[in-house]
């Protein structure tokens, strides 16, 4: 740049070009709203849906494209869209595929905000959301109407952990022309391969294991089909659901260790779940790996791994007040929602009584997330908390 420019202008413009061919492992973090075009022709012929060029920060940067591509590859898909949270990704699916007059089927044990979004669509948007028993399997065919556009599934279900027969649900849906969206967050795409079991759209709350440090919110939608992806990307664009470059970087930074973390969480969770199962205070452990979990046979057939999240039912003699005291007596397990980070968490849940009772009624339920602390210390923490009952 000519030396004659005023200093103020030099503060904004520089023609310095760093040497090319820099190599390092981290993906560069591009912060951008405005994306620069080389010519008016390039600007006029821009295609915001293309992943071969750039239009505007909302539609992607090299940083977001890199994460999308990597997530699609992990899941065995062709396309991926990033959303500002898992719940935002759920909303994108509903608004991409549902129109006034359409019907959507949602499992009773789905992540609760997904269910509440269904209620909102029913109340204010002329959609009907109906809730189904997650163990219905091929029987879902009887619920599918000509106006049923979308079927949600989640494996296992949030909090109570029933494992649905995803291939049977997908087969019935496809025979009747409905799309199946599977929330695959629990096993991070490492324990269950949703697309090859028939899902059309796979959802991940990247907030969990992909983020891996309890410090960000993000969601992803992965598909194989070009047309489904195009519909999702239109809804994503209409809502302007961009993600922050630094958060994308944090996910990229966590991915290389995700499988190791997942396996460690899963192994520790099995040890602690088995220990809890032997306690007289606990009447049942809700974990897909146990035989008394509804859908255990589908877990054995379809899954290759489990993570750190499970729930327990306390013996009926304990009131909510007593189990609240137990939860508050825990020292290493902190009280909080979400999971997938390094730290152990617990949360009491009230099971909605508008769903089929798989033996839950009358029991207090507490969900545990097993973090990366030493297992023996976590067990000692649980042991000391049980003394509140004595
Ligand atoms: C956490 C979670 C979500 C939502 O993710 P956020 O990023 O917290 O909005 C969706 N589905 C499941 C199964 C989850 O566990």
Image: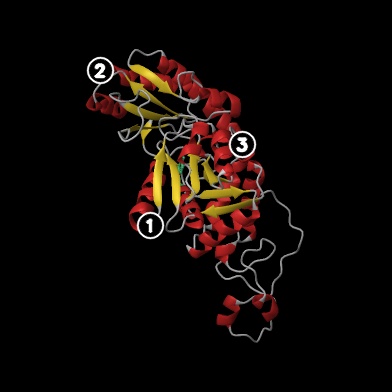
Q: Earlier in the sequence, mark 2 or mark 1?
A: 1
Crowding near the residue tagged with mark 1, few <14, some 14–19, many ≥20 C-alpha atoms within 10 Å: some
Residue 142 image point, x, y percent: 47, 38
Mark 2 vs mark 3: give the one in front.
Answer: 3
Label placed on residue 126 = 1
Name the residue tied to disc 3: 197
Task: Identify the residue at image location x=56%, y=52%.
Answer: 248
Q: Pinpoint residue 41: horizontal percent, then vertical percent.
A: 69, 79
Q: Give the mark nearer the N terminus: 1 vs 3.
A: 1
- Callout 2: SS: loop
The residue at 61%/67% (across/down) is 48
Precedes in sequence: disc 2 or disc 3? 3
Quick check: 211 above or below 4?
A: above
Q: CA distance from mark 2 to mark 1?
A: 44 Å
For discs 2 and 1, the disc positioned in front in the rendered view = 1
Q: How many marks?
A: 3
Give the residue at mark 2.
317
């Amino acid at each position: 740049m000519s030396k004659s420019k005023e200093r103020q202008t030099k503060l904004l413009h520089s023609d310095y070009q760093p040497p090319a061919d820099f190599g390092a492992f981290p993906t560069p973090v591009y912060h951008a709203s405005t994306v620069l075009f080389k010519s008016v022709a390039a600007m006029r012929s821009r295609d915001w849906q293309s992943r071969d060029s750039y239009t505007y920060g909302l539609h992607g940067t090299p940083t977001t494209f890199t994460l999308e591509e990597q997530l699609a590859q992990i899941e065995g898909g062709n396309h991926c869209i990033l959303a500002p949270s898992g719940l935002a990704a759920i909303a994108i699916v509903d608004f991409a595929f549902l129109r006034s007059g359409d019907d959507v089927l949602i499992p009773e044990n789905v992540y609760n905000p997904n269910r509440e979004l269904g209620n909102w669509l029913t109340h204010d948007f002329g959609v009907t959301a109906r809730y189904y028993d997650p163990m219905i399997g091929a029987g879902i065919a009887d619920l599918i109407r000509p106006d049923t556009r979308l079927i949600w599934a989640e494996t296992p279900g949030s909090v109570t952990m029933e494992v649905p027969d995803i291939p049977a649900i997908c087969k019935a849906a496809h025979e009747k022309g409905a799309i199946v969206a599977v929330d695959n967050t629990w096993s991070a795409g490492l324990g269950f391969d949703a697309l090859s079991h028939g899902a059309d759209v796979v959802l991940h709350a990247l907030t969990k294991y992909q983020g891996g440090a309890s410090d960000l919110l993000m969601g992803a939608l992965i598909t194989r089909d070009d047309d489904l992806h195009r519909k999702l990307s239109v809804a994503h664009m209409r809502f302007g659901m961009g993600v922050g470059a630094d958060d994308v970087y944090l996910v990229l930074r966590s991915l290389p260790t995700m499988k190791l973390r997942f396996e460690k969480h899963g192994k520790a969770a099995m040890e602690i779940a088995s220990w809890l199962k032997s306690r007289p205070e606990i009447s049942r452990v809700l974990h897909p790996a146990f035989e008394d979990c509804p859908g255990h046979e589908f877990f054995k057939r379809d899954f290759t791994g489990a993570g750190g999240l499970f729930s327990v039912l306390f013996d009926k003699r304990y009131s909510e007040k007593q189990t609240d005291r137990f939860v508050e007596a825990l020292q290493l397990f902190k009280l909080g929602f979400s999971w997938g980070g390094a730290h152990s968490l617990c949360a009491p849940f009230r099971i909605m009584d508008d769903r089929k009772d798989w033996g839950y009624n009358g029991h207090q339920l507490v969900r545990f997330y097993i973090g990366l602390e030493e297992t023996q210390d976590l067990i000692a923490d649980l042991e000391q908390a049980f003394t509140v009952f004595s």
